Amino acid sequence: MFDQRIIAVGFLVCFAIVFNFSLHRIEEGHVGVYFRGGALLPQVSHPGFHMMIPLLTTYRAVQVTLQTDEVKNVPCGTSGGVMIYFDRIEVVNILDANSVYNMVRNFTADYDRTLIFNKVHHELNQFCSVHTLHEVYIDLFDQIDENLKTALQRDLNELAPGLNIQAVRVTKPKIPETIRKNYELMEAEKTKLLISTQHQKVVEKDAETDRKKAVIEAEKEAQVAKIQYNQKIMEKESLQQMAAIEDEMHLARQKSRSDAEFYQMKMQAEANKLLLSKEFLELKKYDSLARNAKIYYGQDIPKMFIHGGCSSDLGVDSSTNIEEKQ
């Protein structure tokens, strides 16, 4: 009876040990691959609990979600012979779940060591070897991450389809201390130059603004002066038109007056023409003779002469002769 209990307990212990080594769990975002005797089995498991033969079979969980691999302290020699170090390079990548089996079979479960870490060293050194320190550190630094991503993805498309590079982030490389100080001084000078340039642009902008204001004011004054000038011209033209109208009115009045006087004189002349007939003039002659105080007679005088009236040279001489004779 005691031996049976020992056997039962031993069986339970063995079963628990076997069950413990057989049962395993695959986390979400991972895929399980299995090895037996070092050979990769075609079986691939998904997240959850799974069983395997203990001691003979082992498994590895391969991540199939977005992950970031950090490559640290990457040495790089420039074309000028200066050795620099990139402190950290981050490669964001993702593996397709359907490509896990082929990826592990061709590059083991640590595929990123071969396809990413080693390739980063290679591509970065290729880039540095054909560029100067100034280009790597300043001029082309913003292009390193994109160039590195393009080179990695190009090789992965040929060697390991299913592994995609999403992004590459490169930190500023470490350079020798003496060179770094020179670059810091150069950057300080560039900053001063930039500040000076910006200040100059501000001054020029202010001057341009003042100039535009002056132009606007001048144009405004010119427009006001033009308006005033046009107003004066209009006033002068109005005065001129008024003067012309007054002259025309005055001329019309004068013409009317002259026409009236001319008409009056014409009518008077016509009246006189009718009035001064031969008989009327004869009457007036005798009437005038009757009014004179003295009348002179003489044989040599063909006509009579009225003293104090109208005279001629002949009349004067005749009157003088008459007086002497008397």
Image: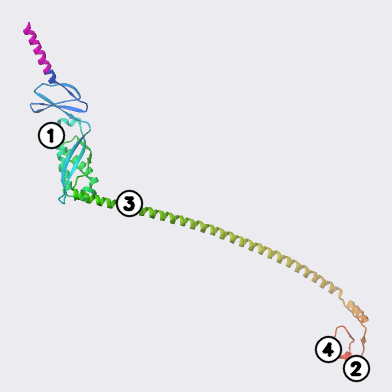
Q: The C terminus lies in which quarter of the figure? A: bottom right
Percent of width and height locating residue 232: 59, 61
Percent of width and height locating residue 157: 18, 38
**Considering only order in the chain, which callout, 3 or 2, is on the residue closer to the N terminus?**
3
Q: Are marks 1 and 2 in contact (CB under 8 Å)?
A: no
Q: The N terminus lies in which quarter of the figure? A: top left
Amino acid carrying label 3: it is: Ile
Secondary structure mainly formed by the magenta segment: helix
Q: Which residue is mark 2?
A: 324
Q: Which of labels 1 and 4 is toward the front? A: 1
> Which residue lies at the image location 15% right of the left edge and 40% below the top edge?
119
User: Circle 2: is it few (<14), some (14-19), or many (20+) Cα within 10 Å?
Assistant: few
Within the magenta stretch, is there residue 39? no
Q: Which residue is mark 3?
A: 195
Residue at mark 4 to residue at mark 2: CA–CA distance: 17 Å
Residue at mark 1 to residue at mark 2: CA–CA distance: 181 Å
Scheme of image coloration: rainbow
**Considering only order in the chain, which callout, 4 or 3, is on the residue closer to the N terminus?**
3
**Considering only order in the chain, which callout, 1 or 3, is on the residue closer to the N terminus?**
1
The magenta segment is 1-17
Q: Which mark is residue 313?
A: 4
Amino acid carrying label 4: it is: Asp
Residue at mark 1 to residue at mark 4: CA–CA distance: 165 Å
The picture quadrant where one finds residue 154 is top left
Number of callouts in the render? Answer: 4
